[in-house]
Amino acid sequence: MRLRHGLSALFLALWSGAALRDGIDTWIDTTGLPPLVIATSPEVRDRNGALLRAYTVEDGRWRMQVSAEAVDPLFVTMLLAYEDRRFPTHNGLDPRAILRAGLQALLQGEILSGGSTLSMQVARLLEDSGTGSWTGKLRQARVALALERQLDKGRILSLYLHLAPYGGNIEGLRAATLAYFGKEPRRLTPAEAALLVALPQAPESRRPDRFPDAARTARDRVLARMARAGVLSAEAVQAARRDPGPTMRRAVPQLAPHLADRALSLGGARVITTLDRDLQSQLEDLARRHMAGRDARLSLALLVADHTTGEILASVGSPDYAATPGQGFVDMTQALRSPGSTLKPLVYGLAFDRGLAHPETLIPDTPVQFGTYAPQNFDRLFRGEVRVSEALQLSLNIPVVRLTEALGPAHVMDALRRAGASPQLPSGVPGLAVSLGGVGLSLQDLVQTYAMLAQGGRATPLRWSGAAPVAGNQVLGPRAAWQVGHILAGIPPPANAGPRGRVAFKTGTSYGHRDAWALGYDGRYVAGVWIGRPDGTPVPGAFGADAAAPLLFEVLGRVRPRPVPLPAPPADTLMVANGALPLPLQRFGGPQGRAAKLSIRFPPDGALLEANSLGIPLKLRDGTAPFTVLRDGAVVAANRRRSDLLIPTGGPGFTILSVIDATGASDRVSLELR
């Protein structure tokens, strides 16, 4: 067997020397070449070209696209010095190397050095042919000669950089540097370059993640050769040998998996996005930490964009793409959910824009009924007349429903669509509950809507691709949009807000505590947070203000550069107190519905109660706060805003309790105390 190898090498040497004979050109030119187009891993990259996520090729291998310009020149120098010193000048075969290998094999009875050129190695890798037979060597020589006639040296080197095996399912230099060093091949240390030169010779037995000692031994052998060849100084080699080398295989970057899947589904093996790799990585880490130790069925989504350009900078569809209990594979930035109270700013902005209200306008927060629909505030309390700005900051339901009735829910839906959202209605017909979350919207839809508010009422379509920005609709006037932002910036931020400057933000909780939301923006960035269960199961105790708002401010705190202040008010903004407003704007005069009648729910008329020191429990239904309570004609409680009261006991006997609300409506009951 050893003699056969030696004769094979000698035959190749003699054959290459006879390559000038008549007819050899035809033999080379008629060589059937394997396909020269190499499939490489599909990739999704960030705005600066940094890798976000990659996918294996069809046979499950990591084979990453790389250009010679993106490779450290030191590696190429070391590769050629070790594998093929005459690569720039030979025609595919190196007669001197082949003759030397053949003579050594004949004299020593074994192969002491290889005669394969880099071109022959590429030929072997292209056809996956073995090296142990003379027919295989001859085929590699023929293909190498043909490659050299059809391709330039740069293309042949590129094929090697893509096909060289590095252990397991890793092929090509770039896949190797990402797997073993966690970096691109543009900058390599001498120790790293030497290991990468050594690995393809025995990729399985020298795998650093399995056989680190064998890998270091092979690396040091390359380093010693580089010292003898004058490529590296003795000092550089000595320093490189002190490098312990990698002992594990790193995962190829898998950032923004949900968005990456969407990007590749639209076609193209190389996708450049608007994402920022560093920010994306930080927010994915933040999402994982935030959900650690919580119910595994919970999920979370984050979205950040530059509202001045519409570029999405980070998109986190779930805390863990592979998590099964929390359905991490579902991209919750795109899922339709109830937005809770997060649409209220849009309704107020429309009311300001159409002259129905001003932030200082007084609006009733009193019981009201529209047909069969009687909206209630979240806390079931009524506050009488409140300023519109206060109604928005307190997220009261009744005032915003009154405004929705005046605007028309269809106009609210139209504004959402013009803002760039895609609202979905279960029944297809919008009702007054739209403003309280009775519509399906995604997190991206809501971030899109808040980006419109941040941009002075002009929609800036959000985008993750590098396509040119598209001009959007003017949904609101700049004045109305600024007024909404000014009100939202006055909401007390969570304790973790820090010195970030003013942020216009709003929280929301959907019916049944199924979704917790927080949306906000400054002068440049807009962000959104969603927390809940993908299957829509209620999460008791989950409130947007408690669960999502602190996370929103953490998200905004990670955006770089430093936050941009909110804009100044437009010149035509009317900034006066209520008394200085035009009379039609001092009080909201839109549809009032039918006022519900005040009544005493408990105790019932004619009831017999025990007289005790705790007092008489009194429960009211409807009416307009504040309430005044009288016992036998004497005031015993005034300016009460709650609908459940405790009235002092006047002693045993018969008594009459009366209640009067802010509108003058009243009710009374007769009791006997004993």
Image (cartoon, helix red, strand yellow):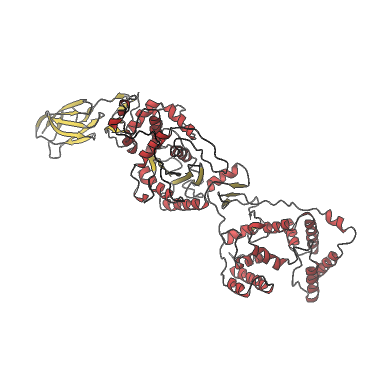
* Residue 491 falls in image quadrant: top left
* Residue 642 falls in image quadrant: top left
Quarter of the image that includes the N terminus: bottom right
Q: Position of residue 62 (x, y in %)?
A: 62, 55
Q: Is residue 305 above or below residue 109?
A: above
Q: Position of residue 306 (x, y in %)?
A: 48, 44
Q: Position of residue 144 (x, y in %)?
A: 78, 59
Q: Is residue 139 left or right of residue 363?
A: right
Name, please, the residue furthest toward the right: 22
Q: Is residue 642 left or right of residue 161?
A: left
In the rendered image, is residue 598 in sight? yes
In the rendered image, is residue 203 in sight? no
Instruction: Name the residue at 42% across, 37% down.
Output: 339
Name, please, the residue furthest toward the front: 571
- Is 667 or 660 nearer to us in this picture? 660
- Is 290 or 571 nearer to us in this picture? 571
